[in-house]
Amino acid sequence: MRLYVMEPQQVIYSKGSPATHFFIISKGRCEVVEKGMQKTVLGKGGSFGEMALMQECERTNTVLSIEKVMLWGIDRYEFRNAIESINAQRYNENKQFIESVPIFQCLNKNQQETLLAALSHQEFDPGRKVVTEGEPGNLFYIIKDGLVNCTIKGKIVRQMSRGDYFGEQALLYNSVRTATIAVVTKATLLYIGRDDLARALGSHLQKIIYKNSQRIALESSSFLKSLTKAQEEDIISKMKCKSFQPNEVVIPRGAPKGKKLWILVKGSLIAEQSRKKVNVLECIGDEEFEAAPEGVFEENLRAEGNVDIEEIARQEFEACIGGQLNRVSSRNEILSIMRNVQLLKALPFKKLESLVNKVFVREFGDREVIFYENAPGDAFYIVKEGKVDIIKNNAVIRTIGQHDYFGERSIILKEKRTATVKANGIVQVWVLSKEDFLSLVNEGVRIMLLKRIELQDDKITLKDLHIVKLLGKGMFGNVFLAAHKTTRLPYALKTICRDKIKAYDLYSSLLLERHILLQTDHPLIMKLVKTFKDHERIYFLQEYVQGKDLFDVLRELGSMNDANSKFYISCMLAILEHMHERDIVYRDLKPENIMIDEEGYPKLIDFGTAKIIQGRTYTIVGTPHYMAPEVILGKGYGISADYWCLGVMAYEFVCGMMPFGDSDEEPYKIYEKILKNRLGFPPKINKSLKTLQIVEVLLDKNPAMRANTEIIKNHSYFKSVNWDNILSKQIKPPYIPRVPSISDEILPAMRSKQTLSAFISQEEARDSIDVPKRGKLPDPGWDDPF
């Protein structure tokens, strides 16, 4: 902090000026002035400017010194860095504690994050009992600081200190305490209850641990690792757990092989004669499931200690995966390749599975032609084994091998083959005919795929584009409607001039935005087509979404019923699922950042605040009314902050207002209400609306209790939702905006002789934003990815 001395009647800061510092009065008095009138007088110990510590904003009042004053001041960056450092250290400490506890080591990354968010802490003075022998227990403790005694029947059996833990059985079972824990030196303990943990994770801990153990075993098996996630989950849901006492026979000698699959989730097994051991997380019977079952177990497998083992019969296993394992593995291999075909990425998973069932194998001899250049396209091919040559003008332009594909555009477009393809040695290919493809894909899906193809022109350059008009201006750049000079296809072209990039140090944020947009290929997210650069600017060429933003649509629709609310909430949840799977947190989800396209479906735009996170981030980003409590507090947050934003939107859908601070404009007042007020609904709202249930889940102030996409999607509210139909836009939306024909604007604009650069420069010259003279110099080659 720094000491400031101000003479009487000096302006400390004025309304509208940037908020950068927070002040505490050490001596003297100050007055807070609003609308020319004295509002408050502050004396020694008084403070003002706290909004500066939260985020970049303008001052909402003026503060003057009444007499000579001494002020301690701290700027936002110093404060935020100090708080972030403290919270990051605390978070990392807690994370290390959690990772050291054996029962938590089977939790995945997201589950561990949820557990961390659900932890509480409490301080205990010397002599105080934490738990008492014989009493019911449902809390688990980790010692963060201090020393405690563990006593059984009055006798000290051990001392525990930092990093030690006790009460883990309370998280697994309804049990009584087997010892008394008393504090020796002042102690800080982290703790969590069984019910809170079950609510956060969606199930009781033991069930979670066993399910995770089954997933690990299936994915580790060389015979089962080709199963899809959906197949794994179906198998796990059908497996039955059996418990065995020490030395009890688990699998008897003479039991037929190939009839069951077992997964050991607790303890170990030992073969009676050979003494061969089976450890936890290992499968038994997986090899026999892949081949024809034969033979029997030649010796008893006995339990070493207490054992829990999951099992499933072969018939039920094959029902889960849809057939015999070797055939399903082959189908899954094709499926994994097709999911990476750019043209097919937008197809729902179930639709892809249906297509795979239509695929057949063909073999071609060495130098045999698969198809000729200019022949009609009638099939899509994936190389199963061997190599093929791609030939143009009698010259081999490239050779492709196993799992590469070719001819994919022919199954949807009426295009002739652009090259000849010939086998290079004996080759086997998987084939999907155009006829079979079209028999499974309806007209709506076909149109959607055609639009995606239009956006996959990686040969497009800036010279191919003509500016039609300005779409919008921002602090850092402009967005223009552009059109391809030949095809007349419309695009949104975002431009950022290099002067602003330097002045505002935008280098890393632009690289991050590009990286995020390239990862998000989803029918409900605006698509990045390509990026460009020249000596003046950086350019983002994006899908042009014609329609109306959700903010305006809400004003037209008013308060929604359950069906309409569910449509929009489901669409947004599908978007968040796609991003969160890629560790992307959006951070500013609100109706203004969502366009309702010409088909009536939401499309997420503007990724300027999105971030890739591993664990937590601390920057206060977002719009006040939509910010989660943990974001405001600055203690660190993760992807669950996006669910809070969705909860605020869901509340708006049914109530027509904000849940917190609806009538407030000052950010500080809004934050205060988000942190302090309880969630409530207006009296006029029908309390039987099902949407209110999901609002309560999403607007839980404890981020751990908001769960995750998987748990939220399993909520009864979404039981009737067909997620594949949402992704393929097969559900009739509540509202379809009227959009004018864009060609009416494109055709006249094409007659203009003004160049793209001149049009953009003309708009940049009109910018009223002052660009700071100083700025950071970039790292050499920072813009290479563009």
Image (tube, rainbow, N blue to C red):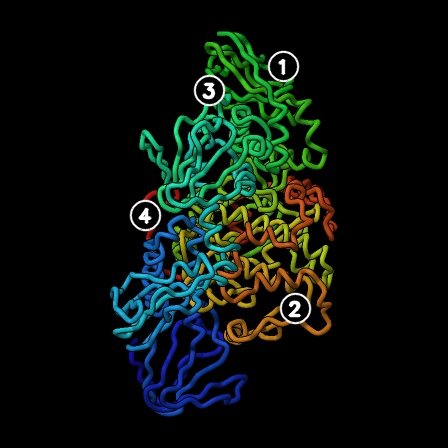
Q: Where, quadrant-wise, is the N terminus in this rendering? A: bottom left
Mark 1 or mark 3: name the one nearer the start of the chain. Answer: 1
On the image, the x and y values in percent for residue 229 come to 52, 39
Crowd tier of the residue under label 3, counting other residues whose Cα lies within 10 Å: few below 14, some 14–19, many 20 or above: some
Crowd tier of the residue under label 1, counting other residues whose Cα lies within 10 Å: few below 14, some 14–19, many 20 or above: few
Q: Nearer the viewer, residue 776 or 724?
A: 724
Please name the residue that numbered disc 2 is placed on: 657
Residue at 46% in and 54% down: 205
Mark 2 or mark 1: name the one nearer the start of the chain. Answer: 1
Mark 2 or mark 3: name the one nearer the start of the chain. Answer: 3
* In the depicted structure, whether residue 486 falls above or below residue 624: above
Q: Nearer the viewer, mark 4 or mark 1?
A: 1
**Mark 2 touching mark 3, by CB under 8 A?**
no
**Mark 2 touching mark 1, by CB under 8 A?**
no
Q: Amino acid at mark 3?
A: Ile
Which of the numbered marks, if any, corresponds to residue 400? 3
Q: Nearer the viewer, residue 470 or 699?
A: 699
* In the depicted structure, whether residue 654 falls above or below residue 486: below
Q: Nearer the viewer, mark 4 or mark 2?
A: 2
At mark 1, the secondary structure is: loop
Please name the residue that numbered disc 4 is placed on: 779
At mark 3, the secondary structure is: strand
Please name the residue that numbered disc 1 is placed on: 375
Q: Nearer the viewer, mark 2 or mark 1?
A: 2
Q: Amino acid at mark 1?
A: Ala
At mark 2, the secondary structure is: loop
Residue at 56% in and 20% down: 430
Q: Rounded to the nearest whole Å, what is the CA distance between mark 4 and mark 3?
A: 37 Å
Q: Rounded to the nearest whole Å, what is the CA distance between mark 1 and mark 3?
A: 20 Å
At mark 4, the secondary structure is: loop
